[in-house]
Image: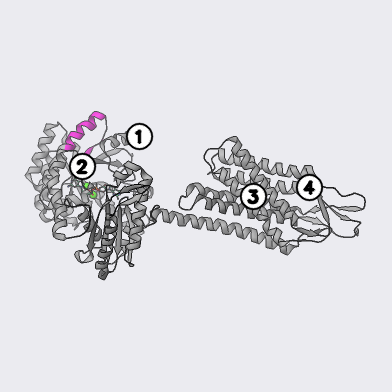
Amino acid sequence: MFSKPDLQGITTLEGEYSIPIVILSIIIACVASYTALFMNERVKQNIFFNKYFWMFLASIAMGLGIWSMHFIGMSAFMLPIPMNYNLILTIISIFPAVFAFFMAFYFANKTSKTNWHFICIGILMGLGISSMHYVGMAAMEMEAKYYYKPWPFFSSIVIASGVSYIAILIFSKLQSESQPIKLIVSILMGLAISSMHYVGMSAVVFYVEGSIQSNLHHMHIMNMTSLIVIITIGIFCLFFFAGLTSLLGRYADYRLNYFDALTRFPNQRQFEKHLKSMKVSGSLAILHIDQLEKWISAYGYSFGDKIIKIIGEFVQSLKTNTSRVYRIEANRFAILDSKEQHSESLKASIESILKKLKNPLIIDNHRIKLDAVCAISHSDDIKRIEELFSNSMAVLQHPSIQYDHQVIEYDSKIHTFNLERRIIEDIDFAMENQDLFLVFQPKVWSKTKELSGLEALIRWNHPKFGMISPGLFIPILEEQGKIYDVTDWVVEKVCQQIVLFIEEGIHFSHVSINIPGSYITSPRLINVIKENLLKYNIDSRLIELEITETSVIHDIENAITAVSKFKEIGVSVALDDFGTGMSSLSYLKKMPISTIKIDKSFVDGVPTSEKDSAVLKAIITLCYSLNFKVVIEGVETKEQFEFITSFTEAPHIQGYYFSKPLKVNELKGWNQARV
Ligand code: C2E
Ligand code: CA
Ligand code: CA
């Protein structure tokens, strides 16, 4: 290919270039590089598809890009003789580039990289680009012959490698995710490809033996139709791959969000979604594997993963056809069958799974015996579909539970009673220990964004059940008459904490305490508050009580008297969850309350819903016209905050937008960060 023919008796052919097509070819090379970088990004972002899969897609995009660039570049070239392409070689020419770029992406995505790595990657890319070009050249079929001038030939490869090296260096060293860097790198890559092509073209000398007619015109190596076909194929492929990448990326995000990566079963999120969308019918089994941590601490996490995988396989192979399996927690699988009439077959299938789990498993030459139990509940015991889950969980949380490979069916007499009983039995112990504790949610004055108050909210970290929501245990305590003791406990803890807050230099106007039901009218409450104010030497204005409409509505007259008494001793009272109860505006005027807390439900649709926004605005205006201080609860977003502050009045805001309820230490940090 480098051997020069005898110059006597040959006629060399001079080529000419069409500049617009040259420019087009360079643009195509840059676009292809950009697409490939975009796809390569997924290697880091996504753990769902194998990273080699993304690298492969990126290499195909790059291969196709170089390929289109080459043939468009060739069509910019004009010779005074006709020419064709060998189809097979033309197709084959794409492979070396794909292979070389796959290798280049492979090295580029390795975490530890030395300068040698970059040099290797540069050379690989240079070779990829050049091999495509020279195989593409070999695909030419024409009457003329050609030979290569060695220097420009080798320079073309060196140039391609050199520019690729610089491009990949920039890509790795600078912030590769930033758009400008990606653009610069794509332009450099595009230039590497095009410069290789055009330097490569300057290395080739076309000639014919003998002489040719002098009146032959320069013509394009390819006609315009072929050019359009190539551009269309090239661009179509690039868009196709870019689209495919995005689509696969989205699919992968969906899988990661809704499926467990290890077992590939849908996860807890998906489970909750399915459960909510179901009619009240069917059965739910929850398979619990006990002491999984024991095996993990003995043999490591990957060993634990193997156990779960094996159990997953058992469940999948033995479950009924109509049921779906979810991995809802590290050591729990949910098996849900929406057909009521299948409850017996579901139970039988679970029994066979547990029977299998009773046998020892051999994993990595370790013989292990798993402890497992399965709780099952059916829709005949429930009114709302969510109860299917809470009932199965109540079975698992029962103190008599044993992990002896049994299926235990939910029994309302045993299991419901138990949860309530445990709460009542354990609450005293929880108050004495640190299991029950308070968190404080800041209220912020929207005008100055200063901390205006705090609401004390109770938390229970139960040794057996974990964190239980106040929404669950407070109604039980109320029902069982235990809530008064707990409220007294809260009053004392708040007073103790106020002293500490003042010592810490945290400034606020009050801490509010939630007062349940009709306790506000009890003489016991006012005495408890007076005692604690005295005991801890606290200014009564630092305490605010929150009562709800529903709790006072039945006994408005007494409630008004009680609230007045608190007002007399300097303790203010706020009306909580305003708007959710049987709102009767007539009593509002008579109530000597200082503050109205507008419920979160009025804020949720704001500002997107015009109707909700108008209602919220009207309520705020009404409260101000009655001279109440206003607190808006449940403000979560900037948009909600901005909408609320767009009025002339400046309410106080309580919600996740400013802060969630915080533990004492967190509150100190939150406050310090703001000053
Ligand atoms: P609440 O008095 O209306 O308290 C506000 C609830 O809304 C708190 O839930 C708080 O965490 C939550 N919240 C605040 N801002 C946002 C927000 O921006 N978005 C969302 N989604 N939620 C927000 P929590 O702490 O779970 O308390 C629930 C209910 O339990 C309270 O509602 C209250 O009725 C009761 N509670 C909590 N602590 C006590 C207590 O010490 N005594 C009594 N009697 N009831 C309490
Ligand atoms: Ca409250
Ligand atoms: Ca509230």
Mark 2 secondary-structure assignment: strand
> How far apart are the alpha carbons under marks 2 and 1?
23 Å
Q: Nearer the viewer, residue 309 or 657?
A: 309
* Viewer-side label of 2, 1: 1
The reply, left or right, for residue 223 in relation to residue 641 is right
Look at label 1 and name its amino acid.
Ala
Q: Is residue 333 magenta?
A: no
The reply, left or right, for residue 150 in relation to residue 270 is right
On whether ligand 2 comes within 8 Å of the CB at mark 2, the answer is yes
* Viewer-side label of 1, 3: 3
Mark closer to the chain start, 2 or 1: 2
Asked where in the image residue 526 lies, by quadrant, the reply is top left
> How far apart are the alpha carbons under marks 1 and 3?
46 Å
> How far apart are the alpha carbons under marks 4 and 1?
65 Å
Look at label 3 and name its amino acid.
Cys
* Viewer-side label of 4, 1: 4
Look at label 2 and name its amino acid.
Ser
* Viewer-side label of 2, 3: 3
- Report the magenta residues as a range: 493-515
Q: What residue did someone put label 3 on? A: 30
Q: Residue furthest top?
A: 503
Q: Are marks 2 and 3 in contact (CB under 8 Å)?
A: no
How dense is the environment of label 1, judged by Cα within 10 Å: few (below 14), some, or many (20 and up)?
Answer: few
Mark closer to the chain start, 4 or 1: 4
Q: What residue did someone put label 4 on? A: 202
Mark 4 secondary-structure assignment: helix
> How far apart are the alpha carbons under marks 3 and 4?
21 Å
Q: What residue did someone put label 1 on? A: 673
